[in-house]
Amino acid sequence: MGEYTANDVNNQSKLKVKEGNVLYESTRGNLHGQTASQAITLGMVPNGGLFVPSAFPDLNWQDLEGLTYGEVAKRVMMPYLTDFSEEAVSQIVNVYSDGTFDGEDPAPLVSLGSFGVLELWHGPTAAFKDMALQVLPDLLRISLKQFNRDEEVLILVATSGDTGKAALEGFKDRKGMHIVVFYPEGGVSPVQERQMTTTEGSNTHVVAVKGNFDQCQTAVKQIFGSDTLKAQLQEKQLIFSSANSINWGRLLPQIVYYYWAYLQAVKQGKVPSGGKMNVVVPTGNFGNLQAAYYAKRMGLPLDRIICASNSNNVLADFFASGVYESQRAFYQTISPSMDILVSSNFERFLYEMSGRDAEKIRTWYDSSRQGTFTVDPTTLKACQDTVYAGWANEEETLETITRSYQTYQYVFDPHTAVAMKVYEDYRSETKDQTFTVIASTASPFKFSSNVIRGLDGVNQESCRDEWEALKRLNQLTGWEIPKGLQGLENKPEKTVSSCTPEGIADLIQTMFVG
Ligand SMILES: *Cc1c(COP(=O)(O)O)cnc(C)c1O
């Protein structure tokens, strides 16, 4: 025990399902008819697979005209939150207007002519993961309440940078919740590290692991599977949960901003009412792109969804060939949040593209295949009809930062620059003039020294450290340093534990079992 199982949740007969609301099923056909709180509490399907909505509610964008972001969020999320009350959802979406996000609009669409940039980084950690991680703790709290469980929750997160800080900010000082973030020592940027170590809150913990991100992630996954540790934690009234993007509670809030982008594009006169719009998504684990796809399924007039990868171009190769080949060289790039070879949410996409064929998904994701499989021609055709995929290497990414600044006086972070480059390639290849929105996933200040390399290559030597780079970027561009990154170098740091990947279980035991 110490973790919910499919049986536990199947026994919850008291849960009320509202008429017309969606239920959740597994991509591998091994679980059906689950409510939102079951899907969110479990995170992933206990015997393998991911939770997906069994149907897509229709939502006409015109019914949302004139609403605030929070109101749009409520309208988009409500039909998916099967067993949540309307009051609960109203309260949850308050986060978009209570000052947590800078400015009046939590996701402004900045128009640069024939395309727009949807800035998703105005939250507390200056990365788009705030859009969902500011909401997930509430979704989880309410989900747990539905089961009348009074244990406290222990969230474990392995991070290569952005997720760790966004999760710490989301969960800090939440009653009945504890969070431990594991990051590879020396494997995150100085700004990312300092962001994590300066997090306030007595329930937040940060651990530097002596190893790379993959070792870190594998070790944390093993912890989730450790029955001994689960039993020990259960005695202390603690259960494990995950803030990873495989959790439906992370995807759902991301559908909202695609509706928002469309509403803004129409309002700004960039898209004729009811006309089509494209989106470009800088992609890693495919969560952000999958959310765009779900918006389209709900009736949002999206045309092409464009998938942008960096040198870890496993997805671009897949869309060209139908072969997913994750056994390949791994590159550490200047867009580190996209350095991913096993793209976890892609399973959700293939589920839809295969016509919801759980048997095919089981074959492709059979563990013996070790992340390598080939899909059938019909599925590949569906994939290619839905998504255009491309990638940009390091040099192209830096060039794009330079060129975009010269042309538009707009500063792209390296992740968004990858998306911009793929968009340019798409335009010249297809001549498609449709207004296109680029999802901007991080503030350029999160990656200042690399952005300066792009803007001001020749003088890069003069930056002593990241803190100087932040100020320098501010001076060069006149852009303001995001609040969450200001004065980081002077904030008190919490004690960071350190351990080997093998030592993670012992450390958790010392911290929470005693
Ligand atoms: C997490 C992240 C991505 C990748 O998003 P996915 O949903 O995992 O595809 C891209 N850019 C930045 C800055 C990120 O933090």
Image (cartoon, grey):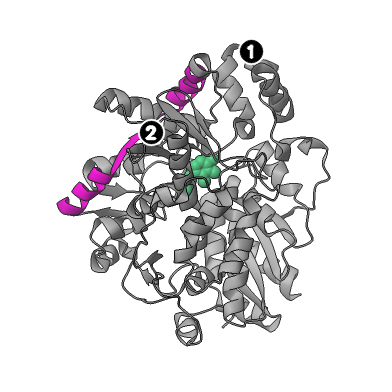
Neighbour tally class for label 2: few under 14, some 14-19, many 20 plus, Cα within 10 Å: some
Amino acid at dot 1: Asn
Q: Position of residue 432 (x, y in %)?
A: 28, 28
Q: Quadrant of residue 180?
A: bottom right
Q: Position of residue 45 (x, y in %)?
A: 43, 71
Circle 2 residue: 271
- Residue at x 35%, y 61% (from the top left corner): 56
Horizontal side of 303 relative to 11 (left or right) equals: left
Q: Quadrant of residue 124?
A: top right
> Is residue 277 in sight in this rendering?
yes
Horizontal side of 305 relative to 134 (left or right) equals: left
Amino acid at dot 2: Val
Determine whether 237 is above or below 387 in the image: below
Horizontal side of 295 relative to 136 (left or right) equals: left
Determine whether 197 is above or below 155 in the image: above
Q: Which region shows up in magenta?
A: 376-404
Circle 1 residue: 459
